[in-house]
Amino acid sequence: MRKLLAPLALLFASLPAHAQTPAPPVEGDAILQNFTFTTGEKLPELKIHYTTLGTPQRDKRGEITNAVMILHGTGGTGKQFFQPQFANELFGPGQPLDTQKYYIILPDNIGHGGSSKPSDGMRMTFPKYDYDDMVTAQHRMLTEKLGVKKLKLILGTSMGCMHAFIWGTKRPGFAEKLAPFACLPVEIAGQNRMWRTLTIDAIKADPLWQDGNYTTPPAAGLRTAASLSMIAGANPYALQAQYPTREAAEKYKDEAFARMFGRNDANDTIYQLDSSRTYNPWPLLEKIDVPTLWINSADDFINPPAYGITEKAAARMKTTKFILIPASPETKGHSTHTWAKFWKDDLARLLAE
């Protein structure tokens, strides 16, 4: 947490002396009583951890009017948005999500971060949550804990992008605007489903996994998980330009793998990757009737642009602007979604509409 907050602290410290210092981040937990999952499974208490930036503003009726929710990707947490490539481009004075103007809510979704997850103790008996459950938990966190009945914006990256499409199709109008980045509004199938299930299969095939009741982390399975994740998130153009020799490529590979390997619990990883299994907003896209900024990148292994899906989907969403960021040695593959320099001007225009 301290490491992730450092970029935000530097941002605040760089403000002019006359500028009002933004309020520091606030963390909290929403304890959702008697939570029922789409499978019918239940938990007497489901914890959703969150971090907020800024201060709620209220109208004459006492309703919060400046709330923005930002949703992370698979395996991430709300605190990932404190990294400088995101926070330093968006949260400062005059920037698109100025924390002196907006009340920003950063939840850890079910199965992630400080929220309820298999590794808390239930392991593989934890309810088999899906994206609809995650969105339901977000809604209950907002309304029951934070008193938010309307959002100015939902910005979601990767898995959070898909959550934004669920909000737009199943809870239309709760958010005044949507910004889904790095996903497709279709069932998770083809290559996307395959790399996810290959990861799950590798963990389960590791003898140390023991049906989820391991005493030693299943290292072989987790190695495969880290390897597939590296490939899925990479920008091949940048890798070729930056590491043009075998020696350079293998050195970078070893360094990147060391940062990624063992970062997440094996059972948590299985649940995180499988939670996309029921996602499919495709039949309901016409329900999205609020201004929407949908951005993908051409170097995204997980969501390649040549499928033809984006053109068909955008034609059905009359209030949506779709942007494809061209691939270059500077873009970040699937992770272009959290490098705000590539799209912050487009976000500013959406918010100004």
Image (cartoon, grey):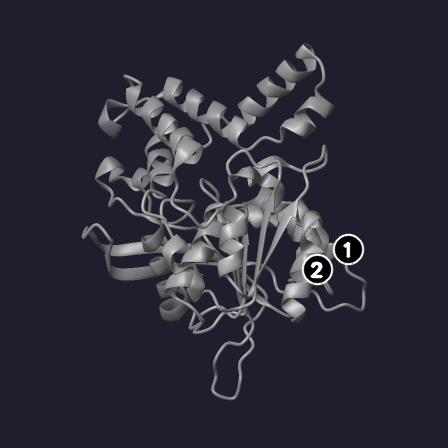
**Residue 54 at what x, y percent from top left?**
59, 66
Compared across the picture, whether 174 is left or right of 339 comes to: left
Residue shown at the point (35%, 30%) measured from the top left: 197
Q: Could you say which quadrant of the image residue 152 lies in?
A: bottom right
Classify 10 Å Cα crowding around label 2: few (below 14), some (14-19), many (20 and above): many
- In the rendered image of this protein, does residue 116 appear above or below residue 285? above
CA distance separating discs 1 and 2: 10 Å
Q: Which residue is mark 2?
A: 92
Q: How many marks?
A: 2
The percent position of residue 64, horizontal first and vertical second, equals 50, 76
Question: In which quarter of the view is residue 286 placed?
Answer: bottom left
Amino acid on which the number 2 mark rests in the picture? Gly
Quadrant placement of the N terminus: top right
Which is more N-terminal, label 2 or label 1?
1
Kindly tell me whether residue 97 is visible in this rendering: yes
Q: Which residue is mark 1?
A: 14
Left or right: where 60 falls relative to 331: left
Query: Where 301 sits versus 108, above or below?
Result: above
Q: Is residue 266 above or below residue 4?
A: above
Q: What amino acid is found at the position of numbered circle 1 in the picture?
A: Ser
Instruction: Identify the residue at image location x=71%, y=61%.
Output: 95
Question: For numbered disc 2, what is the local secondary structure?
Answer: loop
Q: In the image shown, does 307 or 60 lie closer to the viewer?
A: 307
Of discs 1 and 2, which sits in the foreground? Answer: 2
